[in-house]
Amino acid sequence: MAETGAGATARPRTTVEALQGFYRRAFEAVELPTADAETVARVLIAADVRGIDSHGAPQARGYARMIRQGLANPRPNIQTVSEMPGTLVLNGDNGLGPVVGDYAMRRAIDKAREVGVGTVTVRNSNHYASCFYYPLLAIEAGMAGMTMTTSGPLTLPTFGMAPILGTNPYAIGFPGGNDSPPFLIDMATSAVAMGKVGIYRREGQTLPEGWTFDEQFQPTTDPERARWLNLLGGDRDHGSHKGFGLNVAGDLFCGLLSGGRYSAQVPLRGTGPLETSHMFTAWKIDAFVPVEEYRARFDEYTTMLRDCPPREAEQRVLVPGDPEWAEEVERRRDGIPLHPAIYADLQGLATELEIPFIG
Amino acid sequence: MAETGAGATARPRTTVEALQGFYRRAFEAVELPTADAETVARVLIAADVRGIDSHGAPQARGYARMIRQGLANPRPNIQTVSEMPGTLVLNGDNGLGPVVGDYAMRRAIDKAREVGVGTVTVRNSNHYASCFYYPLLAIEAGMAGMTMTTSGPLTLPTFGMAPILGTNPYAIGFPGGNDSPPFLIDMATSAVAMGKVGIYRREGQTLPEGWTFDEQFQPTTDPERARWLNLLGGDRDHGSHKGFGLNVAGDLFCGLLSGGRYSAQVPLRGTGPLETSHMFTAWKIDAFVPVEEYRARFDEYTTMLRDCPPREAEQRVLVPGDPEWAEEVERRRDGIPLHPAIYADLQGLATELEIPFIG
């Protein structure tokens, strides 16, 4: 553990290995089998290394508490509900989301290997950390991948005054080319994810307009007052009906096609089993086109994006995923900076579980 | 043909049957086989009846001209490029988009019937009219459906000053319940579709901020000066990276997975064969859950949306698709109102083709 950085942004850094090892110890301490503790650690660290500071370290203590409070099952018996050659519905038996999600995405990949495309829906799971992790598994298998998930109801529908929608995020990934890293997006269909509001709150920054509502459902830019989320698009003229449509589609793909809960049925964390629903799809690239052709054209396409003349001299057009790949290189080299509040939270977890802290 | 409406909005109305019959005659006149002319007519009228006034009647003359100028093939031999049980790549042989798209979506549905999910990608097609038509075919088969398409490069990437992206729309549909019509969304991943800018131009209305750029890539709200489109989200704080990510995913799903053109490779209409690429996916509902359970839960879910307290007394929370189902009921009863410019355009087409005009 080293203190790095200068000025106001100085914060403790930990190596990837040390933090990942701590996660593994923590989840073994709450009785997960070693392989599953390793999976949870791998999913959380994937967010930490890519700079998704809301979905790695800040989730660890909450996940462990869900187990300790009996709200999630450390040793789930994941079962098949229904199956066809290209599709599968799983009951996650209230396992931790990363354990259930990792298993389900791998099953979708297996199906895509057999028939070209595979879709797996899941009921009775939990918060599964960063969405992008799951299409990343597809990318590692030479496939395109997509996932969606339900989540606690924090979002107001267009024209509505009750939080009946989740952030219902989508992630989509495609393998890279010979010279280009993969394409990877991970986006809430709300204007923003609540984790990001938490980052603004910790940093004492004002929120952009159109992101959040206060307890009385009135627009607010104060992160201390922000209680509910707006949809992607913000208002009708700027596409809130599109955010709304994608959000509802997420409920239908995950909740209705799994026979599980949609977001409005997911309780706030800590009040009962979440029974989150997910959807995973994988597409085998060479079911469609030869892999070499795909790689060459991916390079050609991403070069076209990067070569686009920028609006301002200091800007450049990015390929979705680029900032996170760059962040990963830096953090694997320099370590992961942890906000003091998150660092303290992890220290608290080590104390709670009576395990050694980050080495 | 009747003149209806009052005041400034008075415009000619035609019955659904008369307009659909006119489309059929027009496409038979340009040498499409009768069944294919009927398909084009069915796809165009689907937009007209649902109030999508940019994608029905305004497309007819352009499609016929593409055939007459030798830019599209009236009698395509659609061929399989590669196939697995759940996937298929088709070469559309430069047929009209609705002919190729209708065939491809039906093949995706066939595959979903066999293995639960089916994805078909298409190269060498053309503009396929309204996206929503294709998931509607899935809905009619008791399935969920999704489509995306490439399109001419009219959209600027975030931070970029060249039109290298299409509007790359997505449509997603789910079957309805016992008491609720289907869920159906159709959305450009640009801030708006160019057809909608055309409607503002015809109506002499100012565009909302953040939709368009002028010839010099500067923001404009003047529909006469609007030349290029912004992305869904508008700016970084409001999610333009999400619009950008979905847009690029559309290029990858359609262009790269078909071995066909991505949007930047599609020429502006009238300058050469478009060689548009598409993607279609169908999911068989009862591969996942029993249909009766699905229908009951769809009713429960959509009732929850409709019962959400509205922000203003005169507003209500809608289910995506609701306004278009209501429009369809009204237009099937009262006829389809045509803007005078579109009406004149169709008259011109009748003259060009020497066929009887709308009866």
Image (spheres, coloured by chain):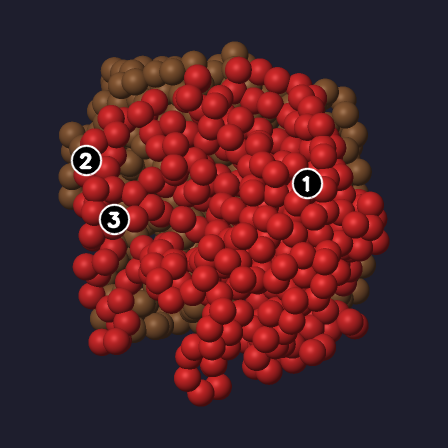
Chain colours: A red, B brown
Q: Position of residue A249 (x, y in %)?
A: 60, 42
Q: Amino acid at mark 2?
A: Pro
Circles 2 and 1 on the same subunit:
no
Q: Amino acid at mark 3?
A: Ser
Rendered view: A87 above or below B60: above
Rendered view: A310 above or below B73: below
Q: Quadrant of residue B57?
A: top left
Disc 3 versus disc 1: distance between alpha carbons? 37 Å
Residue at 34% x, 72% y: name it. B219
Disc 2 versus disc 1: distance between alpha carbons? 58 Å
As helix, strand or loop, the secondary structure at mark 2 comes to loop
* Label 3 crowd bin: few (<14), some (14–19), many (20+), radius 10 Å: some
Q: Amino acid at mark 1?
A: Leu
As helix, strand or loop, the secondary structure at mark 3 comes to loop
Q: Which residue is mark 2?
A: B273
**Can the viewer see residue B23?**
no
Q: Which mark is residue A180?
A: 3
Residue A108 located left or right of residue B227: right
**Label 3 lies in what chain?**
A
Q: Which residue is mark 1?
A: A32
**Label 2 lies in what chain?**
B
Q: Position of residue B172 (x, y in %)?
A: 53, 38
